[in-house]
């Protein structure tokens, strides 16, 4: 099975001969580009049903309960294992270029009934960053032709704010949990993406980036503008990136620095996420002047 995905200006072509599953509904939304006239960075994936052994000389640089990462001479291997199991189910080899080799261990193909289950193997955190884009842990709404991103840690109320803006400000929700940010010519756009967390809302749309709103809980209500290092730290803290990957961190920092030269970051402190959307919209309008 071959299939294509388009995230912003990045085109992913996946070749998985063994795969007999189905295209998930959300990923099917991104099988076609939102803007067909734009040039794309192309990334090729080859998914094989084949046992692969990482070289013994590779060094473990990071591990958690379901993945370990090994490196050697600029090449990285991510080895996947389900929690509680004694055997690996997949290895992904990344030589730092736009060609990714994915190896599914024989007998483990049962773990991939749909394209949704292939998502961890696509290494989108690294692939997008090296192609000039990154994912932010943010709810994305389009308001007055521009996108407003509500970002912050899980459970802070991103999707709640998005719904408030949908109700009170007639904004359109593009994604309730993640958004893709990428520069196009002289400005930055936000794009929909197929990962949407528990919000279950994702659309394949783009809009010029308006403002970013960083959500924090507090015992009082306050909207302030973050600037300089404070704004950079806030955005970096919610960008999707592998914590062990220094190369990607440097590339991401360059992208975030460029983004903040054009976009305002507001910090919303609130006792509850029900703070009036009109108050935030006024603050966004003032910051944009």
Image: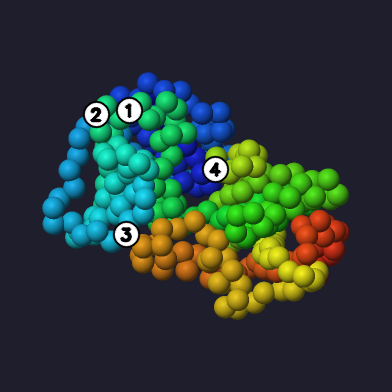
User: Of all residues shown, which one is farthest toward the bottom?
Assistant: 228
**At numbered mark 3, what does the secondary structure look like: helix, strand or loop?**
strand
Which of the marked residues, 2 or 4, is nearer the chain's N terminus?
2
102 with respect to 33 (left or right) = left
Crowding at label 2, few (<14), some or many (≥20) Cα neighbours within 10 Å? some
Report the residue at 26% width, 39% height from top: 87
Q: Position of residue 140 (x, y in %)?
A: 66, 50
Of the two numbered discs 4 and 1 on the same chain, state the one appearing first in sequence: 1
Label 4 close to label 3 by CB (< 8 Å): no
**Residue labelled with disc 2:** 106
Q: x%, y% of residue 169?
A: 84, 50
Residue under label 1, please give it: 109
Instruction: For the residues labelled 1 and 2, say whether their Cβ atoms are less than 8 Å apart.
Output: yes
- Secondary structure at badge 1 equals helix
Describe the element under mark 2 as helix, strand or loop: loop
The residue beneath circle 3 is 62
Q: Hey, which residue is sitting farthest front in the picture?
A: 84
């Amino acid at each position: 099975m071959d299939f294509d995905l388009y995230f912003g200006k990045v085109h992913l072509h996946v070749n998985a001969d063994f795969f007999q599953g189905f295209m998930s509904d959300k990923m099917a939304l991104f099988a076609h580009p939102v803007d067909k006239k734009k040039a794309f960075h192309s990334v090729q994936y080859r998914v094989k049903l084949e046992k692969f052994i990482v070289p013994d000389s590779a060094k473990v640089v990071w591990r958690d309960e379901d993945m370990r990462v090994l490196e050697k001479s600029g090449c990285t291997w991510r080895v996947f294992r389900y929690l509680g199991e004694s055997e690996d189910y997949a290895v992904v080899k990344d030589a730092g270029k736009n060609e990714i080799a994915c190896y599914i261990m024989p007998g483990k193909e049962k773990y991939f009934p749909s394209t949704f289950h292939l998502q961890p193997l696509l290494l989108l955190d690294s692939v997008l960053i090296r192609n000039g884009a990154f994912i932010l842990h943010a709810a994305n709404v389009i308001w007055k032709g521009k996108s407003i991103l509500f970002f912050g840690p899980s459970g802070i109320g991103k999707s709640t704010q998005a719904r408030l803006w949908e109700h009170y400000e007639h904004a359109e929700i593009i994604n309730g949990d993640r958004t893709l940010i990428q520069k196009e010519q002289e400005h930055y756009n936000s794009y929909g993406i197929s990962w949407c967390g528990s919000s279950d809302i994702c659309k394949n749309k783009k809009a010029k980036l308006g403002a970013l709103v960083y959500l924090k809980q507090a015992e009082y209500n306050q909207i302030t503008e973050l600037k300089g290092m404070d704004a950079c730290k806030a955005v970096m803290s919610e960008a999707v990136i592998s914590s062990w990957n220094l190369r990607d961190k440097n590339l991401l920092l360059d992208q975030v620095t460029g983004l903040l030269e054009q976009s305002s970051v507001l910090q919303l402190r609130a006792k509850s996420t029900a703070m009036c959307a009109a108050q935030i919209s006024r603050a966004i309008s003032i910051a944009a002047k």
